[in-house]
Image (spheres, rainbow, N blue to C red):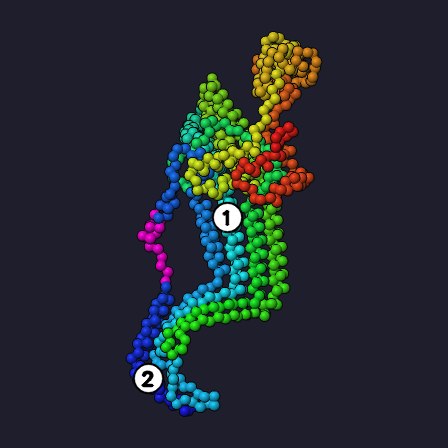
Amino acid sequence: MEIIRQPARAVNDAQSGGCAAPLRAWLALEFAAFSFMLAGCAVFPAPLDSDARARIALDSHTALFEGQEPLAGPLTLAAAMARAIKYQAEYRLRQMEQAASEAQLDVARFDLLPRLTANAGYTTRNNEAFGFGFTPGGQAATNPSASTERTHNTQSLGFSWNLLDFGVSYFRARQLADQSLILEERRRKAVQTLVHDVRVAWWRVEAAQRLLPAADALLAEIDRASERTRVIEARKLLPPQQTATLRRALLDLAQQISFRRQELAQSRVELAALVNLPPGSDYRVAGPASDAREVLDFTADIGKLEALALRERPEIAEEAYRVRISADEARKALVGLLPGVTFDLARNYDSNRFLVNNTWTSAGLTVALNLVRIFSLPALNRSEEAQRKADTARRLAMAMAIVAQTRIAAVRYELVADEFLVWDEAARDDDLIVTYLASSAQAGIDTELELIRSRARAMASRMNRDLSYANLQASAARLYHSVGFDAAPREDESKAVAELARLVEARFAELERINFTRPPALAEIPVAIGEVRGVPAHAAAMLREGAKRVLDAAKIRIVDAAAAELRLDLEAALDDPREGRRGARVAVTLARGGSSTVSGTAEFKTTMSEPVDDEQWRALGEGAAYRVLERLAPLRVRRSSLRLAESLDAGAARRVAAVEDDGALLEGPPLALRPESVLQTVASGRAGPGEEK
């Protein structure tokens, strides 16, 4: 070996003398590269300065509202929904997330293809790669030799395909595809929530647009009235307790109005944000011409709606996609246990002039198997089974929540409708009280303050009424949302605002026609007020007038005796006066038309004070008419929850029958977003005998 070392040392010594300068150059280059690496590691936080913040703020504000159609004229409900679908910032974020997911899927598809790799290299060294060869007998050569140039370059173009990588990439691409579908369902859910919020905010803005100017003026008047009560109290123009009570009542009503005013005032900003208008925009909504509101009866089949919700809700579809993702994850883990088979094919080039063949083709086949991972197969199977059970449990829990939400949405609509009817009646009564007080002949300080208090109470009732109606609209929107109805197909979202608004309006008009009906009209039975016996003619006329008041209020048609189906005969009797009072009785007889056939009797008793005036006689006639009012024409129950209790029957037999009868609804293809083709299925449960389904 000493023989080999000595020639090698001699060769190195011979080369080192002529390579001192290149060696120093290489050392300098290495030092420069090391210094550059150290400089690259010296990274410090760089906060935004004021100019950068101002530029970002300006760009953000400009980008928020650019590319939008300008708002021309009052904003209708359908137009508000259309603008929200097209321009709302959070919904656009959902769209961008889905687009990013689809782009990731496009990238993942390329992972399924074989690798085609192009390589190019350049190699150099500061001395020659000399070496000593030796014979099999151990005899070393006396002269060094080299088979590689000091500087040479290489190129290659290789094709490589791994079966294991292909399997893993295939299932990963499937998972990304399902993930993009999950984002599509989340986009649907975002649209449904957005439409619900727009509907609530729009109706609140409509109420604010009508009521806030009058409410502001009334609050100023209440403030002035409160100051006047202090002057009245100081001068003792009224009893102090009465003055303080009036002032406290005014302050209570002012507090109620202010509280409702906050809800109405901020709704303008909420709606502006939902339709992507600047929050301070001075816009108006195109509300109904009259402040009269109609409450529709919910008449859809709840069982079928629950079945439809289980089919159409985005959350159920998302859970189904999650099950598929979990299954692909298990398959991907099983593929990882298979042998890794790699096939290589490459074309190579080397500029080394000492090579006999500078270009050549190489091919190879490699098989690799991790023997340890085979023992993890039972654990993988247990993990897959546990994940499958967890997915099933989560899906069933979601299904139960959706069924409950659908049922609650239907019940809530009925309850909120009842609340609106109460406030509607209260608002009308408060307006009547204001009218009576304003037209009163009395003129005094207490009457004037009472009038202001009545006006404040009427304003509070109107605010509560309109907010209740907005909540009623929210309940209807929540019902659509709980079932999974879409405002418009996705392909229509790119249309102009006017066209999209027209489609949205038609869509919801169809949904309303199928799921709701107008309340039934009162049955008109012509009634005549017949004889009034037992009292003088003037008192009989007053009794007749009081009975007529009640019948008119009940919307019962009063006709002559010849045209009447029922006749109302009254017979009054008065007891002897006692301590300024006397008992009164009115016997009421219902007879058929012009005949003497009696169909019913009733009696009304009361006590009247002496002297008996005209108003007491009228009240006596009203009481007598009330005793037989339901027999004349059963009053329509105004509360829809009482009128439609049977439609919300929670009996198990009915629910099971609804699902069994609609089996195709659960097993068929997804519900088309066009309403005309599928919504008749839900409406078919409403058709009665002799009606077309």
Q: Residues within 10 Å of mark 2 (few under 14, many from 20)?
A: some
Tell me if residue 335 is in the magenta stretch. Answer: no
Looking at the rendered structure, the kind of residue marked 2 is Gln
Q: Which residue is painted at 37% across and 76% down in the image? A: 352
Q: Which residue is painted at 30% across and 83% down in the image? A: 18
Give the main secondary structure of the magenta stretch.
helix
Q: Which residue is painted at 41% across and 91% down in the image? A: 3
* Looking at the image, residue 251 lies above or below residue 5: above
Q: Which mark is residue 660?
A: none
* Looking at the image, residue 419 lies above or below residue 39: above
Front in this rendered view, residue 59 or 126: 126
What is the distance, in whole Å, between disc 1 and disc 2 at their CAs? 70 Å
Q: Earlier in the sequence, mark 1 or mark 2?
A: 2
Front in this rendered view, residue 351 or 31: 351
Question: Which residue, given by chain and number where applicable, does mark 1 sit on?
Answer: 184
Q: Position of residue 503 (x, y in %)?
A: 47, 36
Residue range in magenta is 44-58
Quarter-of-image position of residue 351: bottom left
Front in this rendered view, residue 107 or 315: 107
Q: Position of residue 670 (x, y in %)?
A: 56, 44
Q: Residue furthest top?
A: 537
Looking at the rendered structure, the kind of residue marked 1 is Glu
Q: Position of residue 71 (x, y in %)?
A: 39, 36
Label 2, secondary structure: give it: helix
- 660 sits to left or right of 468: right
Q: Quadrant of the N terminus?
A: bottom left
Q: Position of residue 485 (x, y in %)?
A: 54, 40
Q: Which mark is residue 15?
A: 2
Query: Does any portion of residue 162 appear in the rendered image?
Result: yes
